[in-house]
Amino acid sequence: MIQADTSTAPSKPRLGKLDVLRGIALVAMATYHTGWDFEFFGYLEPGTTGHGAWKLYARIIASTFLVLVGFSLFLAHGRGIRWRRFGIRLAQIVVAALAITLATMYFTPGSFVFFGILHQIAVASVLGLLFLRLPAFIVAAAAAAVIALPHYFVSPTFDAPIFWPLGLSEIIIKSNDYVPIFPWFGAVLAGVALAKTMQYFGAIELLAGNITPSWLDRGLRFIGRHSLAFYLIHQPVIIACVFLVSQLSPPSVPAPREVFGRACVQSCQNDNDKAFCEKFCDCVIGQTEAQGIFEEMFAGKRDQNDPQMQQIAGVCTQQNLP
């Protein structure tokens, strides 16, 4: 993903294998987004890329990017912050993040990206400067604390939209790319701690040199060095390709009842067994159809915070408890 400066100093050679690692992460991201786009166009069941192995894959990719952000931030500024270079790169990331927000507000207004991976990188790059001169073990401890906090502390105090970037609210946030400060800033700090540790043991040089075959090395290095451009360009290209596929071979369109039922069961299974979820979701569909609000629910005009939907959920839960 997009990084702070990645070179240790102008007089030192660029760490080629670090660019390769970044390139691999970018290619992995593109494969995930390909799956997301096929789901968006209706070729995969709703919720497919947000659950199970797909969800784990997405988290591994995001974690890798953010660890590399912290690693690169230390290499670039650990011996002294080069403010001009830092400011230029930060401005580029902020502009790109705002562009993503505006584009998604237009195309997917119900789940637009208000604090995604680019927003996280921009904020983390600034906050990360505070940790560059601290001992590695303190940075590692801070990383663990940031990652753990949302698992042990959430509060309705942070339910207001202004606090959503923190990641500490009790409500479920709807966004196509939501990467809040807690816990994801912890991955950036982990990258800083890793870089400091490798430098202490003289292991940074392990990232110098090339990989084989040479054509793969050149390709991944190129992607890694132009990470911001790749990030901004790849998704429109993939969407265009999937759109062309949809024109040549349109996906089958299941009935709204079937679509909602599948998505409901997938979401429910995060905390409950399949048998309960199937009965619960059938009940919700039946209740909303009986009350004439199924179409509004399916269109996203009613969510789990709607009083009528909360009442239906309560009735269906009681009816299907073992």
Image: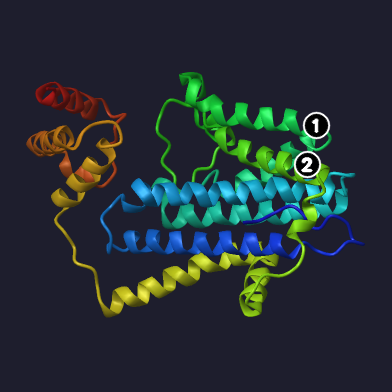
Q: Circle 2 — which element?
A: helix
For residue 313, side relative to residue 37 (left or right)? left
Residue 198 seen:
yes
Whole-Å distance between the Cαs marked 2 and 1? Answer: 8 Å
Residue beneath the point at 64% across and 32% down: 143
Q: How many marks?
A: 2
Residue 8: give x, y in percent of width and height.
84, 55
Residue 179: give x, y in percent of width and height.
53, 42
Residue beneath the point at 59% across and 56% down: 99
Label 2 sits on residue: 196
The answer to which of 177 and 224 lies nearer the viewer is 224
Quarter of the figure with residue 131? top right
Residue 161: give x, y in percent of width and height.
50, 32
Residue 199: give x, y in percent of width and height.
81, 46
Residue beneath the point at 36% across and 72% down: 243
At label 1, the amino acid type is Pro
Q: Circle 1 — which element?
A: loop
The answer to which of 98 and 27 lies nearer the viewer is 27
The answer to which of 76 and 303 lies nearer the viewer is 76
Q: Residues within 10 Å of mark 1 (few under 14, many from 20)?
A: few
CB atoms at circles 2 and 1 under 8 Å apart?
yes
Quadrant for the C terminus, please.
top left
For residue 49, side relative to residue 226 (left or right)? left
Q: In the image, which disc is placed on residue 135? A: 1
Q: Residues within 10 Å of mark 2 (few under 14, many from 20)?
A: many
At label 2, the amino acid type is Lys
Quadrant for the N terminus, please.
bottom right
